[in-house]
């Protein structure tokens, strides 16, 4: 896929809304979620309001907290997790 295709996908996703929905589905306040990943509430709020964008490191922490893939968070897939069934430990 070329970069143009990636831009189209990214424009159609509202990562902030996805983050807010995931947090609420886990019944977490912004403070609880922010504390668990080690960021300020204002930072998490900025992510949810699309005013700030998380680093790769924070994206991984958010994915772990919400038990979803980073691809799901950034809108590259609608599948929340990766299917690794059938793969060996090495794969």
Image (cartoon, rainbow, N blue to C red):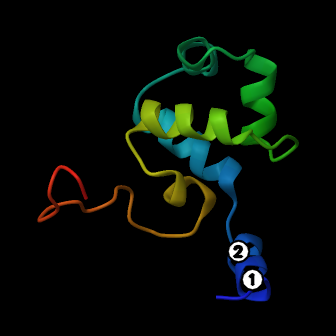
Measure how far apart labels 1 and 2 are at the Cα level. Answer: 7 Å
Few, some or many residues within 10 Å of mark 2 (<14, 14–19, 20+):
few
Instruction: Locate the C terminus and report the quarter of the image it occupies.
Output: bottom left
**Residue that appears at 72% across and 28% down:** 44
Q: Residue 21: give x, y in percent of width and height.
A: 53, 45
- Residue at which label 1 appears: 8
Q: Residue 78: give x, y in percent of width and height.
A: 45, 69
Few, some or many residues within 10 Å of mark 1 (<14, 14–19, 20+):
few
Label 1 secondary element = helix
Furthest toward the front, the residue is 90
- 65 sits to left or right of 20: left
Residue 55 in which image quadrant: top right
Instruction: Locate the N terminus and report the quarter of the image it occupies.
Output: bottom right
Label 2 secondary element = loop
Q: Nearer the viewer, mark 1 or mark 2?
A: 1
Q: Disc 1, disc 2: CB below 8 Å?
A: yes
Residue 91 marker: none
Seen from the viewer's position, the closer of residues 51 and 56 is 56
Seen from the viewer's position, the closer of residues 83 and 25 is 83
Q: Residue 70: give x, y in percent of width and height.
A: 53, 51
- 83 sits to left or right of 30: left
Q: Is residue 82 above or below residue 17?
A: below
Residue 85 in which image quadrant: bottom left
Q: Residue 81: give x, y in percent of width and height.
A: 35, 55
Q: Is residue 61 above or below residue 3?
A: above
- Residue at which label 2 appears: 12
Q: Is residue 53 above or below residue 30?
A: below
**Residue that appears at 17% across and 49% down:** 89
**Residue that appears at 59% across and 65% down:** 75
């Amino acid at each position: 896929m070329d970069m143009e295709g990636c831009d189209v996908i990214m424009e159609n996703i509202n990562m902030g809304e996805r983050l807010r929905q995931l947090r609420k589905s886990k019944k977490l306040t912004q403070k609880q979620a922010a504390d668990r990943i080690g960021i300020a509430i204002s930072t998490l709020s900025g992510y949810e309001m699309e005013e700030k964008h998380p680093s790769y490191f924070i994206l991984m922490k958010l994915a772990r907290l919400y038990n979803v893939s980073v691809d799901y968070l950034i809108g590259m897939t609608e599948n929340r997790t990766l299917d690794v069934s059938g793969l060996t430990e090495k794969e």
